[in-house]
Amino acid sequence: MVARMATVAYVGLEARPVDVQVQLTSGMVSFVVVGLPDKAVKESRDRVTAAFAALGLAMPAKKITVNLAPADLEKAGSHYDLPIALGLLAAMGVVDAESLAHFVAVGELSLDGRISPSPGVLLAAMHAAGRGLGLICPAAQGPEAAWLAGTADGMEVVAAPDLHALVAHLKGNEPLPPPDPAKLEARAFSGPDLGDVKGQETPKRTLEIAAAGGHALLMCGPPGAGKSMMAAALPGILPDLTTAEALEVAMIASLAGSLEGGRIARARPFRAPHHSASMPALVGGGVKARPGEVSLAHLGVLFLDELPEFQRGALDALRQPLERGEVEVARAALHVTYPARVQLIAAMNPCRCGHLADAALACSRAPRCAGDYQSRISGPLIDRIDLFVDIEAVKASDLALPPPAERSADVAARVSAARALQSARYAGTPARTNAEAEGKQLETPDLLSEDARQLLTRAAESMKLSARAWTRVLRVARTIADLAGDAQTGRAHVAEALSYRRRAPQS
């Protein structure tokens, strides 16, 4: 007899079906797992054996063969512990095999029989709902699975704290209560407020435009000018995620194992990797092709401080994700795609010493050192950035002033209104913000005045703008018009957008 238990293998953000087949036969006593298991899956033999001992069960004195089908799909992760244990219990006759046929199971076993959380439960729940099956998962991750089950009529979620309680539930002795669905948590922003930033009116205006349209922004200025502080304040003026967007973000967080306690938040992700981050850390990869920072920041902010200090190859690897909104990770035996619709915010010093504009503090190599330092950023990457702003050092007279009257909440209200206009404009299209809009969507006569078009044409010739830069100026101008509540992009909007444009440096 072969007992079966359904589970999944994670390939990118896709959960593929895996059939756990358990067979007990006569012969030398052994416990073999086949079907391209990795080291973590092979070690499940010891965890299952110890969990059975904690349950008071002895392993059968037979040859135990566990096959993970399909055999040509690599199996990785500790979430195979629970389905292997349940398949073995069914083969031993401890639980009814028919009762397991209606479930997908995922979870890691502790040596004392507890069922520990494992990454990817939300993806497994989506897979189970698509097949019309229920889900057996760790109790700690029951809320996230139950939240998804609320959208799938009739989907049953069994969230068990340990193997003993799960067996009692399956035998009908002590049914487990259904888990409470997770609630979308309201944003609890604890970062700096724009009202705490003294001076820097132009940079704050640029930050507002970036937030309203989802544009990429590069801030350049001396140390201590407030670049990092303003970037950290950006999440406080961004609108909350919609329910559909929260699900997208939660799926990636679930796969990465960072969805703590099954909590699903409306706050947009904010990722700020150190400049020593490698290419796989930024764009994804590694042996198991895991998502990188650009995917973990999906629908949120990717903040790269000290931009020229990052490895040039790692920065150039961001070019495709920034343009397409997704990143493809290719390996010899694996090819996965992760979403990567991020808002890039970068900060840098004008040169290595950071005091290019101050003759008293600048190093002896100025201004030549500025060209060497800024050339670490390739022209094609610069061309993908919509907004550039030079930030000057804050004067002592500005620091002595009282805090500005306008707070982040005031800016957030304008940003939210501008985003609402964009949502209505791009309804039914792949674009969500102006930063994602196609050029043809912005150049219609009802959206772009003739005066604005002529100004942009002359500026493109004199500034030698690329076709990509032309579209990006249009996107920024449209956002400026949205913030002003204007139906048509006018000459003044284009002129302001051009003021935030910078020629790409020669590499």
Image: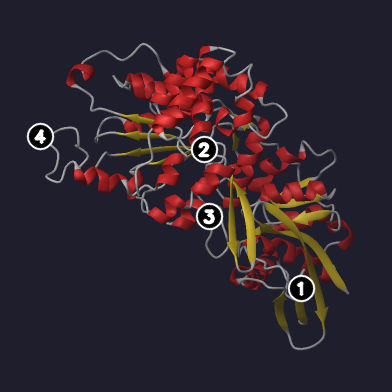
Marks 1,4: beta carbons within 8 A:
no
Q: Which residue is mark 3?
A: 284
From the viewer's perspective, is 188 left or right of 47?
left
**Residue 116 at least partly seen:** no
Q: Secondary structure at mark 3?
A: loop
Marks 1,3: beta carbons within 8 A:
no
Q: Residue at x 88, y 74 (%)?
A: 1
Q: In the image, what residue type sits under mark 3?
A: Gly
Q: How is the image coloured?
A: secondary structure
Q: Position of residue 241 (x, y in %)?
A: 60, 30
Q: CA distance from mark 1 to mark 3?
A: 30 Å
Q: Which mark is residue 266?
A: none
Marks 3,2: beta carbons within 8 A:
no
Q: Secondary structure at mark 2?
A: helix
Discs 1/3, front: 3
**Comes first in the chain, label 1 or label 2:** 1
User: Which residue is more in the foreground, 380 or 232?
Assistant: 380
Q: Which residue is mark 2?
A: 468
